[in-house]
Image (spheres, rainbow, N blue to C red):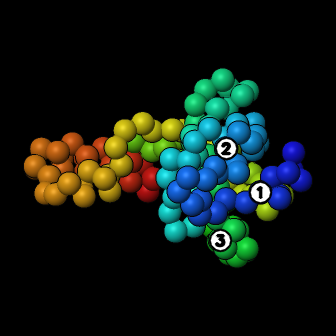
Amino acid sequence: MGAKAHAVRPAAVKPGTVDPLIGRVLGRCRLEERIGAGRTAIVYRAHHEALDSTVAVKILLPEAAANEEIVRSFETEARAIARIDHENVLKIYDVGAEGDLHFIVMELLEGESLQALMSRGKLPPEDVFRILIPGMRGVAAAH
């Protein structure tokens, strides 16, 4: 399994093509669907086979995984967040690597992203407070 994971790396997937990681098992998680991408990582919806639950798996992009400092920061971030027990902080279940795939297994939060919400235009004050107050409570718990 580790050798297979090593041979298939997350990357930009062209429209109309299949993501080569979909269906693969990474750690104990079967990757089901790509749900997000950022500057350094891609996030997948996955089924955690041991827990029999749906989770998110964040995988470093090849360019980021090649940078030792980014990998160290990625792992440190996961461990730091895992130590926080608060309803407004994402739960981390695992952090690891298989071959050159570095990943974090975490709680999957359903719903619209803040970026998508904000792209629709100015938010009413009650929505801003509904979003910001729990976020600030999470930040306070982290500190």
Identified by mark 3, the residue type is Ala
Q: Earlier in the sequence, mark 1 or mark 3?
A: 1
Marks 1, 3: nearer the viewer: 1
Q: Which residue is mark 2?
A: 22
How crowded pointer 3 is (Cα within 10 Å; few <14, some 14-19, many 20+) is rated as some
Q: Which mark is residue 106?
A: none
Q: Which mark is residue 64?
A: 3
Q: Are marks 1 and 2 in contact (CB under 8 Å)?
A: no
Identified by mark 2, the residue type is Ile
Q: How many marks?
A: 3
Classify 63 as above or below 27: below
Q: In terms of secondary structure, where does tag 3 sit?
A: helix
Q: Looking at this rendering, what residue extends furthest in the front direction? A: 16
Q: State the image coordinates of residue 70 (x, y, percent, origin top left).
A: 64, 71
The answer, for residue 74, to whether it is visible in the render is no
- Residue shown at 50% from the left, 47% from the top: 35
Quadrant occupied by the N terminus: top right
Q: Which mark is residue 8?
A: 1
CA gap, disc 2 and disc 3: 20 Å
Q: Earlier in the sequence, mark 1 or mark 2?
A: 1
Identified by mark 1, the residue type is Val
The answer, for residue 35, to whether it is visible in the render is yes
Q: In terms of secondary structure, where does tag 1 sit?
A: loop
Q: State the image coordinates of residue 65 (x, y, percent, origin top left).
A: 70, 68
Quadrant of the image occupied by residue 42: bottom right
Q: State the image coordinates of residue 129 (x, y, percent, origin top left).
A: 18, 47
Quadrant of the image occupied by residue 66: bottom right
How crowded pointer 1 is (Cα within 10 Å; few <14, some 14-19, many 20+) is rated as some
CA gap, disc 1 and disc 2: 11 Å
Q: In terms of secondary structure, where does tag 2 sit?
A: loop
- Residue shown at 67% from the left, 32% from the top: 48
- Residue shown at 73% from the left, 27% from the top: 50
